[in-house]
Amino acid sequence: MSSQQQREELDRRAQQGETVVPGGTRGKSLEAQEHLAEGRHKGGETRKQQIGQEGYQEMGRKGGPSTTNKSGGERASREGIPIDESKFRTRS
């Protein structure tokens, strides 16, 4: 199967609602999913640069335990997971 045929098949599957590109959730075509995935990656990298490696890791610790009815911060405090909010500060 040629590269063009593979792309056409992936595009067809994407149009049927399947996620064919990691990070491309909700894209309605192969191209849209590729753009979504690229933007999400760049957004994460930009945030990491803004708040630094430590802040980014703390953000993950806070957001990781989130549920649909409680924020990660609420659940972390309830379960005694320490989160250092000072690491979230933007470095200037």
Image: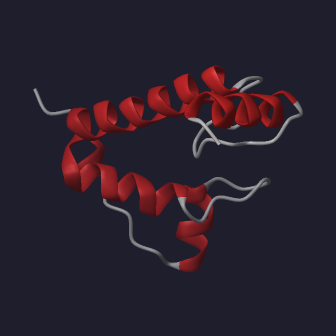
Q: Residue at x 61, y 41 (%)?
A: 21
Give residue 23's position: percent from left, percent from top.
58, 42
Give the image quarter of residue 27.
Answer: top right
Residue extending farthest to the right is 16
Give the number of callouts: 0
Residue extending farthest to the front is 1
Color style of the picture: secondary structure
* Rendered view: 35 above or below 90: above
Give residue 76's position: percent from left, percent from top.
54, 68
Q: Residue 66: in sight, yes or no?
A: yes
Residue extending farthest to the left is 92
Q: Residue at x 84, y 27 (%)?
A: 15
Would you say 18 lies left or right of 74 here?
right
* Rendered view: 85 above or below 10: below
Would you say 73 lies left or right of 90 here?
right
Give the image quarter of residue 11.
Answer: top right
Q: Residue at x 53, y 23 (%)?
A: 35
Give residue 1's position: percent from left, percent from top.
65, 42
Q: Residue 89: in sight, yes or no?
A: no
Residue nearer the viewer, 50 or 1: 1
Residue nearer the viewer, 60 or 75: 60
Pick the quarter of the image with the C terminus: top left
Give residue 4's position: percent from left, percent from top.
61, 27
Q: Residue at x 14, y 33 (%)?
A: 91
* Rendered view: 57 above or below 30: below
* Rendered view: 35 above or below 24: above
